[in-house]
Image (cartoon, coloured by chain):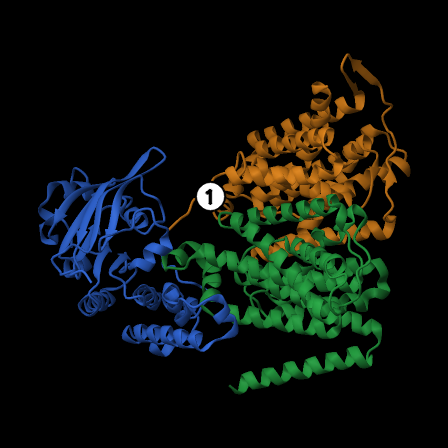
Amino acid sequence: MVIQQALNSLQLGSIYALIALGYTMVYGVLRLINFAHGDVFMVGSYAALFLAVSLHCPLLVILPLTFIAIGLLGVVIERLAYRPLRNAPRVSAVITALAVGLFLETIMLATIGPEPKKFPALVTTTLYTFGSFTTTNLQIMIIMVSIILMIAVDLFVAKTRTGMAMRALSWDKTYAPLLGINVDRIVSVTFGMGAGLASIAGIFVGLAYPVIDPYMGIMVGWKAFVSAVIGGIGSIKGAVIGGFLLGAVEILSAAFLPSTYRDMIVFGLLLFILLFKPQGFFGLPVQKKV
Amino acid sequence: MKRKLALFLLFSAGLTCALCCDFLRLLDPYVAQILMYIGINIIMTASLNLVNGYMGEFSVGHAAFMAVGAYTASFFSISVFTHGPAPVVFFPLSLFAGGGAAALVGLLIAIPAFKARDDYLAIITLALIMITKSVFENIPWFGGPAGYSGIQKYTSLSWVFVCAAATVVVVRNLVNSNFGRGIIAVRDDEVVANLVSVDTKRVKVLAFVISAFFAGIGGGLFAHLIQFINPRTFSIIKSTDFLLMLYLGGSGTLVGPILGAGIWTILLELLRFLGIWRFAVAPVALIMLMIYRPRGIMGGKVLN
Amino acid sequence: MTNNTSHNPLFQITGLSHSFGGLKAVSHFGLTLKPGEIWGLIGPNGAGKTTVFNLITGVYKADEGTVTLGGVDLTGLPSHAIAASGVSRTFQNIRLFKSMTVLDNVRTAGYCRLDYSLASALVRTAAFREKEERLRQSAIEVLTVLGLAHRIHEPASSMPYGLQRTIELARALVNKPKVLLLDEPGAGMNPSEIEKLAATILWVRDNLGVAVVLIEHRMQLVMKLCEQVKVLNFGETIFQGKPGDLAKDETVVKAYFGEDHDAFVN
């Protein structure tokens, strides 16, 4: 039973973590909370749906194609909506982010309609039962691929030159360009990666909870945002841990409490954590300067 | 003195017009409804301006205060005043109750606001919206997830006008006082505000409570206009609407919220022929505005 | 009213200590101020001087030590209460309220003086109007004395640097403080501006009876104004005495110039 819940938590947590990574990387590099990120995740889901249903692509093709396509979407959004506001007051960027999100939702609603759509089963499910718990190959795949992606991101940021530039930018926006870092390019890469990861999460959501709708980006997006903050926004490790923590809380409260209490618990927990650790688990404490 | 007289005359003229429209049915009902929406949006935006504009915080929880006000006022109208006095007497009482309940929630939010700013306050207020929605879903007397129905249409142009005028006057008087200077000082430099004797905790509580109170009144008016509310009505999207109106008109100014609320409401109505696409056009227009005139129409104060 | 003659210490700091993490920033700092005294607080960069100010004014809660003003214990009080008791300060990097006018910057500091209720503010009672007017007059008075009368309605952020420092001083004085803490008031000024600043501080001391503690690197100002100085190095007080005796003290010279030193330049 415990292992069952653990597996379910890992699955949901992986999805939150993948989305949270996008929030945290963009925040780290731009100090911007990309409120449109949740809607990008939603678009990713629909893109995969399109590839699966209209073009009959197999999963192995859908994964990279969606990653690239939505990654490009992220880059375009940054280029058109956020880059002109790079030096504008923060509030403008936030409003713009909200507006972009609304725009994406509307496009989806207008072209596809508000009715939830069923995501095709691209993987023939095989059940594995081990005594007290049951898992599927799908669940294992989601968890494994997510973990691989998270490790890949961590290695990328830690070991590559681009990753190093991302870290430099997150520590000091003013001087990084003076060291030869092409800020525009790094920001584009960051947005691209974040969006791509979110789209993978979108595919997994479609596979695991096979109904998707244009409004799911809002709820899931905000919850992933919460994960990023709990973990300490700006920290990759934090986003991952925050995601898994949130997944666990949600699964466990759904297991033991009526479903209408779930959101209350999740957000109540968030407030509780912020009370004691206002910068999240791995965030940097804010120092008063006089 | 002359200015006060002029404003009083303006108010009286406005109220007279509103009363005439209400009782003589001078306006097309659709136009009257739009005007009432504008009025309610003015109340919401002007009250949000206190916290997000003058105090420079980033609260996304305004819809939660509206929800509390809407549900409480409706509860009072339906269940408390069932055998009570005439609507013209108990409706303002219901509204006041809604405002009061929202103010209490505002007090609750002010406390974490002592320490948290910017992004963290955004998260806390976001949590507030989710929790509020969850709470109303779980209370059976308010209709649960299905919603609260049977609310009578007591909202009229006159009530909306009076409440909107009150909101604007209160915000104006507050801002041009000791407390107002304290609020702006908190925005500009909170640490230094404390060091020059401003009791920032008290000031923050004041701002949140007053802001929430009027948001609650707006919620009560809203509920008694559309006559049906459910927990999903007061979502993050609703909060986003008010944020958009505030920054469109120019935050941190007196006229900004009025302009923003008016223009956004009318714009969305004018674009109604586009159907769902107006929610694609409007955000794009807003993005253009942010890129080319981020301070909003009235040139409000923006934080860096 | 107790007889608080100029022989009784007005402002007393004892054993003030504070660490940040493992680093001891201030170690057993003590000071006794009488009304009208001007003290200098000097030392190399990072010695802990501004930290002392921050501890006194409640920005940080000191690990140890007490601060009393006129017998009232200020230790551990929130910053706004300390300010309301009569301790005012200025800042190393000018920190005016950028979106306010000059007048409003000064009026904001009068927050503790205005005791009208919220209701009176909203309804604009006569009491409200009267108290606001009195504060306004006080603020204009201070600004006039400091030479800013003609610019009170301008936005504070658009004023030239030197005038911004003056506005900060006005803001610190509007409540008629008993103790004035000035953090590098002469930074960025040329010698003639420093002369004017010194004259202003002396005027303030002579006419308002404030006690002043001055953090400064400009020896010109220290020599001119301070009757006594304390030197801090790595949070410890390494010298206390007359400014004239500074150059003769080995520890002080070593602190500033290291083991190999030149003459102490003025």
Considering depth in this image, is A153 or C5 the residue closer to the camera? C5
Q: Which chain is green?
A: B
The residue depicted at 59 percent of the width and 44 percent of the height is A27
Chain for colour orange: A
Is residue C187 rendered to the left or right of residue C256?
Answer: right
Q: Which residue is mark 1?
A: A286
- Specify the quadrant that holds the N terminus of chain A: top right
How would you rate the neighbour count of disc 1 (Cα within 10 Å): few for under 14, some for 14-19, many for 20 or more?
Answer: few
Q: Position of residue B272 (x, y in %)?
A: 83, 65
Q: Using the rendered image of the protein, determine whether residue C12 is visible from the camera's viewpoint.
A: yes
- Secondary structure, mark 1, is loop
Q: Position of residue A121 (x, y in %)?
A: 87, 29
Residue at image coords 63%, 73%? B165
Q: Is residue C69 left or right of residue B263?
A: left
Q: Amino acid at mark 1?
A: Val
In the rendered structure, the colour chosen for chain C is: blue
Q: Nearer the viewer, residue B259 or B229?
A: B229
